[in-house]
Structures are given as structure tokens and as C-alpha cells.
Image: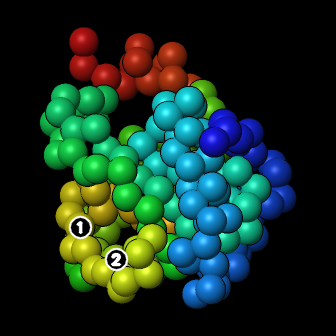
Amino acid sequence: MAVRKIIRMGHPHLRRVAEPVPEAFIKSAELAVLLDDMVDTLHDYGGIGLAAPQINENMRLAIIEIPGGESRYGEIDAMPLTAFINPVVTVNNPALNGYWEGCLSVPGLRGFVERPQDVTVSYTSTEGTSEQLNLTGFWATVFQHEFDHLDGHLYIDRMQDSTRLVFEEEFTRYWTDP
Ligand code: NI
């Protein structure tokens, strides 16, 4: 178990399309160690999601853990720590809604991003089983943000209005209700 370094915007490896996780690797000890490292790293940096490319691993793999309750995103439902292997997102309804997003690879900034709010995610679990989840609202945004990393995209690529890319301090001062 180890906290790994998160690579930041500007590192070319954040911009590549990650390789699928081979079936033979899914229940391996190596993958278990990598997932442990990802969990340690997510908890140490304090985020709700982490994709393998963010720790410079060229793999279609991400973890998500949403604590739930009152947050800077408003009142949200909790989602227990889950690993997603080779996930695929299907949009069920193209209607958009926006949230202020942040990213451990783009530290210190927040950006307002509009994304579809009704998606289905198909993925392989750490047990090797095929799974599907229907996600709406904030959860749909989180999953799209994380899985975008597997295709070399950052949230700033998805922004429609660059005047809503702001530093965290200014976000707190000017863009949140007191
Ligand atoms: Ni991110």
C-alpha cells in the first residue's frame, strides 16, 4: 500500500487514451496492489474519484467514493468505494445540467461544466463480473468526469464558458452563497 504521486495538467500522459485492462489481469495480485494504492492516494489527496492515468498508469480503471450528505455540491447521496474496470458510458438523455467540478490533476481550480444527467455505465467489477449502473444528477457528472480521464480528457475540455474557470479562493468568495 502506498500513496502515489498524482500527475497534473501539462503531463502528456493525462492526454492519452488509456489501454483496456486485460482479462487475465483483473483478479491478479498486481491489480489488487494497484487498487490499494489508488485508494490510499484518493484518501490522502482528499477526492471523490481517481482514474489510473492520474497516477501515471496506462489503464482503463477508476475508483469512485462519494461520502454523501451536505457538501460543496449540495445535499448528495453516498456511494461506497467502488472500482470500475473498462467502463463504458451510454447517455440516455442528452439534456444537460451543470456542476462546479474540481480535479486532483488540476489543483486549486474549479470549473462549471454542463453534462448529461442520465447515463448508464457498463463495467467489469474486481470480481470479473459484468455490471451495469444507471446514474442520474450529480453521480452522472462524477462518473463522466472520472471516465473522461481514460480517454485523455480533462473537465476544462468540457466547459462551455471559460469565465467560469476560477481559483478555489475566488470560488468561495464570489461564486458560493454565504
Ligand atoms: Ni479529475
Dots 1, 2 in contact, CB < 8 A = yes
Picture quadrant of residue 157: bottom right
At label 1, the amino acid type is: Leu
Query: Which one is nearer the viewer's eye here, 103 or 68?
Result: 68
Give the structural element (helix, strand or loop) at label 2.
Answer: strand
Tell me the colour scheme of the image. Answer: rainbow
Q: Residue at x 24, y 12 (%)?
A: 178
Residue linked to disc 2? 121
The quadrant of the rendering that contains the N terminus is top right
Picture quadrant of residue 56: bottom right
Q: Residue at x 31, y 23 (%)?
A: 176
Residue linked to disc 1? 135
Is residue 90 shown to the viewer in this render?
no
At label 2, the amino acid type is: Val
Ligand 1 within 8 A of label 1's CB?
no
Residue 89 is tagged as none
Position of residue 2 relative to residue 72, above or below, is: below
Q: Residue at x 36, y 85 (%)?
A: 130
